[in-house]
Amino acid sequence: MKAIVCVKQVPDTSGKVAVNPDGTLNRASMETITNPDDLNAVEAALQLKDATGCKVVVITMGPAPAEGMLRELLARGADEAVLVSAREFGGSDTFATSQILAAAVKKVGLEDDDIVFCGRQAIDGDTAQVGSQIAEKLGIPQISYAADIKKEGNTVTVKRMLEDGYMTIQCKTPCLLTCIKELNAPRYMSLGGIMDCYSKPVEVYDYNTLKDDPLIDPTTIGLKGSPTNIFKSFTPPQKGKGRMLEGADKNTCAELAAELLKKHII
């Protein structure tokens, strides 16, 4: 049994975000982190490993420096890591990315009792599409917004968080689950894990590795195979300083009301 986790290295949006002229993010100019929701997916897989002894495999698609992120996940307890990296994959939107990641999951090997984990969404795109599209292209059931996960045999019971409550769903494995931050608290890297993570190999899947899969079609991967077109991308202007009104008298209240009226807030 395996728990396969798809993760993404994303720009640290707490810093300055740069945009290329073609509308894509200038990732080389920004610090990167592991996508937060993906850490909850990794933790869900590690908890399944703690309970069942299954193997945890983490997969990411990105440039060569993404290996460092995979090493950190090995230090948290993952057993194997796969870096999907090739120039042919560059510029992929959610459709093309899911094609490539689904092919990578198939290459790792998807068996009857396996579970694929993804984070709910990435903080750079916020589409929440890739996980669902991977499941569709693998032909397996999917359950999104997982807030609690229980596995018994080849049956998975998931409590989904909705806007107005919860929904409990059961499905058979193999399946794909997308995880939310309320699911768990990701563990830290252990000292032993840090010492051992560089002794574990990171396998690289390039274009030649995956090209025989029917999903890897030059017309449906990379920038040319991405149907999403960005009309305009820009950095929003910095907001001005706020204005503080002091006092609890009638005149201050009248001045506040006048300002709110001027801005069409009241």
Image (cartoon, rainbow, N blue to C red):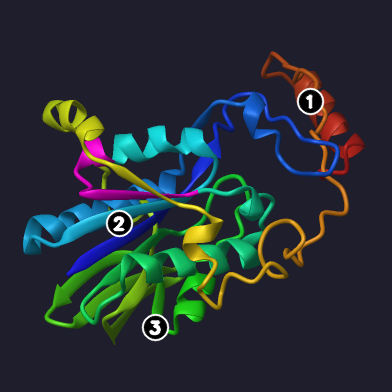
Q: Position of residue 246 (x, y in %)?
A: 70, 13
Instruction: Give the residue pinned by disc 3.
Output: 141
Alpha carbons under labels 1 and 3: distance apart: 45 Å
Q: Are marks 2 and 3 in contact (CB under 8 Å)?
A: no
Instruction: Give the residue pinned by disc 2.
Output: 183
In this view, 139 is above or below 106: below
Q: Where's the N terminus, which quadrant?
A: bottom left
Alpha carbons under labels 1 and 2: distance apart: 35 Å
Return the disc, 2 or 3, that comes first in the chain's sequence.
3
In this view, 20 is above or below 102: above
The label nearer to you, 1 versus 3, is 3
The label nearer to you, 1 versus 2, is 2
Residue sitting nearer the eye, 52 or 237: 52
The residue drawn where x is 80% and y is 34% is: 236
Image mark for residue 122: none
Q: Quadrant of residue 141?
A: bottom left
Q: Amino acid at mark 3?
A: Pro
Q: Secondary structure at mark 1?
A: loop
Image mark for residue 239: 1
Q: Which residues are magenta?
A: 74-84
The label nearer to you, 2 versus 3, is 3
